[in-house]
Amino acid sequence: MSSEPPIKQSDTTFETINQMVWKHLCDRDWDGLPPRGIATSIALEAAELLEHYQWRDEPIGTKDELAAELADVFIYCFEFAQAMDIDIAEAITSKLARIAQKYPAQAFKGKTDKEKKAAWLAAHHGARAAQQHTSKK
Ligand SMILES: [Mg+2]
C-alpha cells in the first residue's frame, strides 16, 4: 500500500476551520456551551454517522449525507477544543506518536492475522499474556 492517502484533503488549514467554527458559534451566541454537552454532541453525531450502517455493511444514504454527519462530528470537535484549550493538530501529532510507540509498524505490517492479534494483545496485556493466548489456539 502506498504511503500516500487515497483521498487528498483540501488545503484549508486547521486554523482556518477553527476560525470558521468559532465565528459560526459567536454569531449565534453558542460560544459558551459546557464541555460535557459538547462531548455528548460529538458522541451523538458519531452515532448519526453510524446509523447509516445500522443494518448493512454498505451505508444507507448518499456520500453527501455521510459527509454532513462527519462534518458535524468535526465541528463539535473544534468546539470542544476551544472549550478545553486544546490544539487539535498538536493533540493528533502527539497521539499518533504514542500510538506508533504502542503499536510499532513492524509488528503489524505484512504480518498474518494471528501475528497481528498477538501484537495487539502484547500491546494491551503484555507479551506473556499474548503468548499464553496464542498458545491456546
Ligand atoms: Mg448530524
Image (spheres, grey):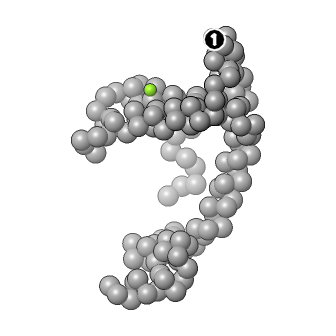
Please tell me whether mark 1 sits on a helix, a strand or a loop: loop
Q: Residue farthest to the left?
A: 55
In the visual, does 40 lie left or right of 21? left
- At horizontal 56% and vertical 31% (from top left) the residue drawn is 37
Q: In which quarter of the image is residue 33?
A: top right
Up/down of 114 relative to 97, above or below:
below
Front-lying residue, 128 or 38: 38
- At horizontal 46% and vertical 72% (from top left) the residue drawn is 116
- At horizontal 61% and vertical 68% (from top left) the residue drawn is 102
Up/down of 9 relative to 2, above or below:
above
Question: Does the beta carbon of the residue at mark 1 sit less than 8 Å from ligand 1?
Answer: no
Q: Residue farthest to the top?
A: 27
Looking at the rendered structure, the kind of residue marked 1 is: Arg
Q: Is residue 12 visible?
A: no
The image position of residue 128, as x and y in percent, is 52, 86
Q: Quadrant of residue 89?
A: top right
The crowding category of the residue bearing disc 1, from other C-alpha atoms within 10 Å (few below 14, some 14 to 19, many at least 20), is few
In the visual, does 3 lie left or right of 54? right
Total labels: the figure holds 1
Question: Which residue matches tag 1?
Answer: 28
The image position of residue 62, as x and y in percent, is 34, 27
- At horizontal 28% and vertical 33% (from top left) the residue drawn is 60
Q: Can residue 35 be seen in this view?
A: yes
